[in-house]
Image: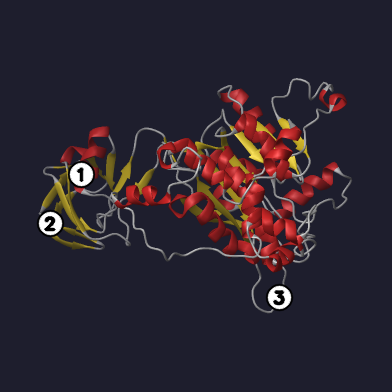
Amino acid sequence: MLKDHMLANENIKPNSNEIEKLKQNFPQFFDKDGEFLIDRFMEMLKTSDINLSKEGYELKFLGKSYARYLSSTKTETFVSPHIEENAKDENKNSENLYIVGDNIDALKHLLGSYAGKIKCIYIDPPYNTGSDGFVYPDDFSFDAKKLSEMIGIEEEEAERIINLKGKSSHSAWLTFMYPRLILARELLSDDGVIFISIDDNEQANLKLMCDEIFGEENFISMFLWNKTSTPPSLSKDVRKKYEYIICYKISNNRENGLSAGIIDGGDMPLLNESNAERKLNFRKNSIIFKINGFYPKGKYDRVELLEDIEIVNGKSTSDLKLKGKFKWTQETLDNEIEKGTVFWVKTEKFAIRYERKESRIKVPSNIINKLECNVGTNEEASKMIGTLFNNKTIFDFPKPVTLVKYIANMINDNNSIILNFFSGSATTAHAVMQLNAENAQNSGGGLELIENIY
């Protein structure tokens, strides 16, 4: 099989992967010799609502064509089981998978069994800060002339690409990340999501790269994780407390959004200053009043009472008609009333609140911290690792288990496969073990982990 892969790789081009997908999905646009009939394809596009503008916004960097080439080639390595390690009592019944080796090869091996099956990917790649040890690791086994022939570029550019080895430039980092994210996309299920930790140094480049690979329309959020409670005080400009976690979905096939847990009961305000003013009619039997008396129409703090109303023993004698900056339209309000949602007026300000009877999924905010999410910091992670290694510093900036647990719980599915192909401190493994222990007590479901140390 490896020989077949090596022979196939001799004919690989940067766009081979894309051409193969076109052949699979649009065979009518290829002739008998396998040549792509681009004019016929363009004619088909003209009949739709697609804008065929020749100019566009894109990310360009030295090594991009080579990065695309790497994502298309077959792996020329093989995976060998660690028999002694697998035979240990704690491992022999495990449904998880840990791969040691270059993650671009590991990802290509995983495609054979896991393409389109991974629900959640979390990675913590090198940040390319200049002090994190990242250098472009590729060991080019060919010269500039051969590379130029392989991917159709000038020899001078090929020489510059080869010279990326050992560098930590933006181009080197992008060339490293690009093929790995393309392969990650192929592994994600139709309702899958990917989370990528990053800091200021490559955040902007990562966003552009992910827009191109996953689709700008599939961007979910740039989460801000409170990484430290003691930011360095030596900087003369900014004391940085946050890092980013960029999140993309693979498509619009997700039935539910992300989850920050389940909310039981509790009332919420219906007023929201950022909304437009609306007029709402609340049915009299849907409201519980904590006030009594007669109230003439007029302005009451942030709302306007559109008709006189009398309240006796916590119930109004007529419908409540208000004008204000409400979150809902009348149609949404009517649907909520049909579901049994209860509304409260607690003071003479008529700042109406609503209470749903059933439990519901809480939508996460873009801030991840201890107060709101019970997610710890680098310091918390360092303490945990210190207890395991006699207070030795093994990793400089480890991620806390609580962070990975929070991310895994966002997918709101206890029977999924999670992948981390930049394994470092084994935080993901600890998080999945804890989640599975909790799930076994509650519902019996379990997450499957695939982890790769590169």
User: In what quadrant of the picture does the N terminus appear?
Assistant: top right
Query: Where 211 falls versus 115 (above or below)?
Result: below
Residue nearest the viewer, comparing 271 with 141: 141
Q: Around disc 3, counting alpha carbons within 10 Å, would you say few (fewer than 14), some (14 to 19), or many (20 or more)?
A: few
* Earlier-in-chain disc, 3 versus 1: 3
User: Which numbered dot is residue 235?
Assistant: 3
Residue type at numbered disc 2: Leu
Question: Amino acid type of disc 3?
Answer: Ser
Question: Which tag is nearer the camera, tag 3 or tag 2?
Answer: 3
Give the vertical position of 91 relative to 332 (above or below): above
Is tag 3's residue or tag 2's residue first in the polypeptide sequence?
A: 3
Q: Secondary structure at mark 2?
A: loop
Q: Which residue: 81% across, 25% down?
A: 86
Of callouts 1 and 2, the N-terminal one:
2
Q: Is residue 254 visible?
A: no
Residue at the disc numbered 1: 331
Q: Is residue 43 left or right of residue 71?
A: left
The span from disc 1 to disc 2 (Cα, nearest Å) is 19 Å
Please name the residue that numbered disc 2 is placed on.
Answer: 306
Position above or below: 144 against 238: above
Residue 424 seen anywhere in this rendered image of the structure: yes
**Could you tell me which secondary element the residue under label 3 belongs to?**
loop
Front one among 410 and 217: 217
Quick one: 274 or 92, which is closer to the camera?
A: 92
State left or right for residue 89 relative to residue 54. Answer: right
Residue 123 position, x and y percent, is 65, 47
